[in-house]
Amino acid sequence: MYGIEQGMRDRVLIDTSVWIDFFRKKDAELLERISILLKSGRAVYTGIIALELINGAKGQKELKALDDLFSTMDKVKESESTYFDAGRMGYGIAGNGFTLSVVDLLIAQITIENDLFLMTFDRHFDVITKYSTLRLFKDCKKRN
């Protein structure tokens, strides 16, 4: 298992599914984990995750909170080949019987290219790890 205390220099891309739970503030343990990542400068974001969160905001207060959040984090970027590589990854995985969303493929590819860990509750990424070098942040399990 990969824990917060290990590899303090390792950066973590936090997926939309985790941010949604974080903003609901119902899980004290998750709040603490994200706070540690933010304070240590290890939490990063990318454009597609910002797009998903901003698009789902429920008013100006949430938009302001997102603006404040993203202003404190490093943004990781795509390379010239990111979209092509994500498409090829999806094509390969589809050949094994799994059709994945282009957003998930893009997030996975950006994570791989930037040598990050992905913190997510989305089980589609478990499939991607079987067919790629995607590394999941294992200290993140959704409790129902």
Image: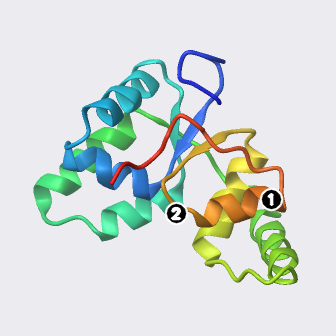
List x then y, in percent, for residue 90.
78, 75
Query: What sort of colour scheme is used for the picture?
Result: rainbow
Label 2 secondary element: helix
Whether pointer 1 and pointer 2 mark residues with C-beta atoms closer than 8 Å, the reply is no
* Amino acid at the residue labelled 2: Ile
28 left or right of 123 in image: left
Report the residue marked by disc 1. Answer: 130
Pick whichever of labels 1 and 2 is earlier in the sequence: 2
Given residues 15 and 77, the one toward you in this image is 15
Horizontal and vertical percent position of residue 80: 80, 61
* Location of residue 51 (image quadrant): bottom left
Side of 129 relative to 34 (left or right): right
Q: Measuring 54% from the left and 27% from the top, which residue is drawn there?
A: 42
Going 11% across and 53% down the picture, which residue do you hit? 61
Q: Is residue 60 positioned above or below 7 on the image?
A: below
* Residue 57 appears left or right of 34: left
- Is 70 above or below relative to 55? above
In this rendering, position of residue 143 left or right of residue 140: left
- How many residues crowd around disc 1 within 10 Å: few (fewer than 14), some, or many (20 or more)? few
- The mark total stands at 2
Q: Nearer the viewer, residue 67 or 40?
A: 40
> Where does the image place residue 24, in percent across and percent down from the top left?
21, 50
**What is the residue that sits farthest to the front in this orientation?**
144
Q: Inspect the image, locate mark 1, and give the three-letter code of the amino acid beneath it.
A: Lys
Residue under the point 66% across and 65% down = 106
**Residue denoted by label 2:** 48
Disc 1/disc 2 C-alpha distance (Å): 23 Å
